[in-house]
Image (spheres, rainbow, N blue to C red):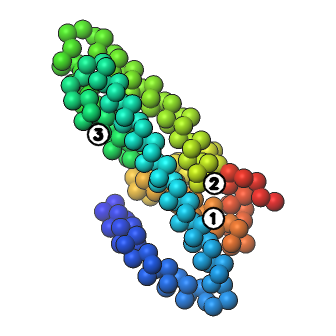
Amino acid sequence: VALVLLLAIFMLLKREDLRGRLMSLVGQGHISETTRALDDAGQRVRRYLTMQFLVNTGYGILIGIGLYFIGVPNAILWGAFAAVMRFIPYVGPLIGAAVPVLLSFAVSKSWLTPVYTLTLYGVLELINANALEPWLYGSSTGVSSLALIIAALFWPWLWRPIGLLLSTPLTVCVTVLGPHVPRMHLLSLLLSEELSL
């Protein structure tokens, strides 16, 4: 896991150098097509990361406001913590909810505060994970919602936790390659949001 993270960080830091090396590897005859494919992939991944940041920030703001009105101490802190934890797929929201729920048990004299806190996290997570994210991420990346769900199953199977973190960016890159690499057209056709015949 640490090796894959280190590799991803260095690839991002040296992306221009890697791009130049890839261009020289592809050859002079395919430079414009390769440049378009790389630019398209970069723009789609950038839109995905921007959308993920906006969704997680909105989620954290709503959690902070909700916890404030429920009466959980340090609501702004727990809202920010929830937003940061949502960047970790599937287990992050559970970790982000655990401490405020336990805190609500500690500060409440009745069961209402913990029940409201659990309900707040549960409802917002259900809306985000099952409706908002597939719709927004699919439309911003050009990958269908169903393909994103399948990718969230396939990449973790292949690469465990790192595959889960990178599932959407990797799927976006595979989808972008379809129109530019004839052998991958089938994958692009299956994964893409828009139908290209």
Provide the secondary structure element on which disc 1 rests: helix
Amino acid marked by disc 2: Gly
Q: Which residue is mark 1?
A: 176
Judging by the rendered image, the residue that carries numbered circle 3 is 81
Which residue is disc 2 drawn over?
142
- The residue nearer to you, when weighing 126 against 59, is 59
Contact (CB < 8 A) between labels 2 and 1? yes
Question: Horizontal placement of 163 versus 23: left or right?
Answer: left
Check whether the beta carbons of the residues at disc 2 and disc 3 lie within 8 A of each other.
no
Q: Secondary structure at mark 2?
A: loop
> Given this view, does label 1 or label 3 mark the residue nearer the observer?
3
Q: Quadrant of the N terminus?
A: bottom left
- Amino acid at circle 1: Val
Asked if residue 6 is positioned above or below residue 122 in the image, the reply reads below
Q: Residues within 10 Å of mark 3 (few under 14, many from 20)?
A: many
Q: Is 192 drawn above or below residue 55 in the view shown?
A: below
What percent of the width, then of the height, locates residue 93? 37, 37
Badge 2 local density, few (<14 within 10 Å), some, or many (20+)?
Answer: some
